[in-house]
Amino acid sequence: MDAARAVVALHSTDPASMPVSVLARAPAASITDVERALYEERSLIRVLAMRRTVFAVPAELVQACFAATADSVAGPQRRQLEKLLVASGVTDDGAGWLARARAAAMEFVESSGEFTSRELAAADPLLAVRVQVGVGTANATTQSVASRLLTLLSSEGAVVRARPAGGWTSTQFRWTALESWRADLGDRPAPEVAAAELAGRWLRSHGPATAADLQWWTGWTKRLTIAALGRLDTV
């Protein structure tokens, strides 16, 4: 926990990088200690937040991360999926169709405990629909709506990654509702309050820094960055 708090959040897009970064900062710790914090105590929680990147953050910072990145991560993810649904010929009403699919997904999430992306896709015909991703590029592929929805739901803070399907280096995770994983996280703060808290923690850990540095780390717009800094006593 001290290692995580010292840098605000531990980068965790590559599942193996986060435990390694803890061991580099706390040589007396072990992989077992990291797994205990992640999956038993749940004092560290993986979130999809700043820059649409996965971080492991102290539990007390989880709600602030989601609130502070609602406009910069969750909003764009929602609009992107709506556009993919239309571009893939699934519907002419991306927002309406997505709302129905999200409701079906959340009904499954709230009644299922831990689950996989494949299990979510099998829960409702809407969630098994496939959309085209990366059309016109070398990486063009199709993905299930369930897979794309998990990205959106995790950016909203509705679901979080639970235990990996394999060992500590595994890239395949099971998922669960945030409230099921940790029910005592408290209410989500107002976005502007959350942004100021996140900015203050980052500056105390990484400053001196420029506004551009903070903007890059958070993935905020310049306007959001300046507004967050305006709520802090900085020099």
Image: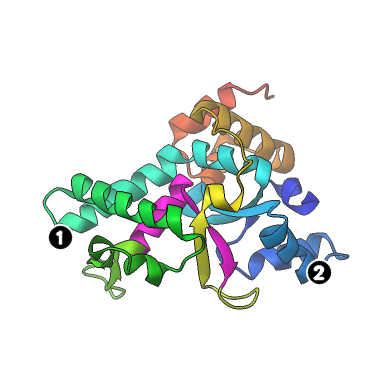
Q: Position of residue 144 (x, y in %)?
A: 29, 67
Q: Quadrant of the C terminus?
A: top right
Which residue is rendered at x = 44% and y = 30% of the image? 223
The crowding category of the residue bearing disc 1, from other C-alpha atoms within 10 Å (few below 14, some 14 to 19, many at least 20), is: some
175 above or below 220? Answer: below
Residue 228 falls in which quadrant of the image?
top right
Q: Position of residue 89 (x, y in %)?
A: 12, 61
Tag of residue 117: none
As measured in the structure, the alpha-carbon distance from the residue carrying label 2 to the one carrying label 1 is 48 Å
Mark 2 burial class by Cα count in 10 Å: few <14, some 14-19, many 20+? some
Q: Position of residue 84 (x, y in %)?
A: 23, 57
Q: Residue at x 41, y 51 (%)?
A: 153
Tell me which numbered mark, 2 or 1, is placed earlier along the sequence.
Answer: 2
> In terms of depth relative to the viewer, which is nearer, 186 or 108?
108
Q: Which residues are magenta?
A: 147-164
Res 90 label: 1
What amino acid is labelled 1 in the image? Val
| Front residue of 132 and 235 | 132
| 29 on left or right of 198 | right
Q: Residue 134: tell me if it is visible.
A: no
The residue that label 2 is drawn on is 30
Residue at point 56% right, 26% down? 193
> Disc 2 on helix, strand or loop?
loop
Question: Looking at the image, is 37 positioned above or below residue 164?
Answer: above
- Relative horizontal placement of residue 28, taking residue 147 as reference (left or right): right
Callout 1 secondary element:
loop
Q: Amino acid at mark 2?
A: Ser
Q: Is residue 38 visible?
A: yes
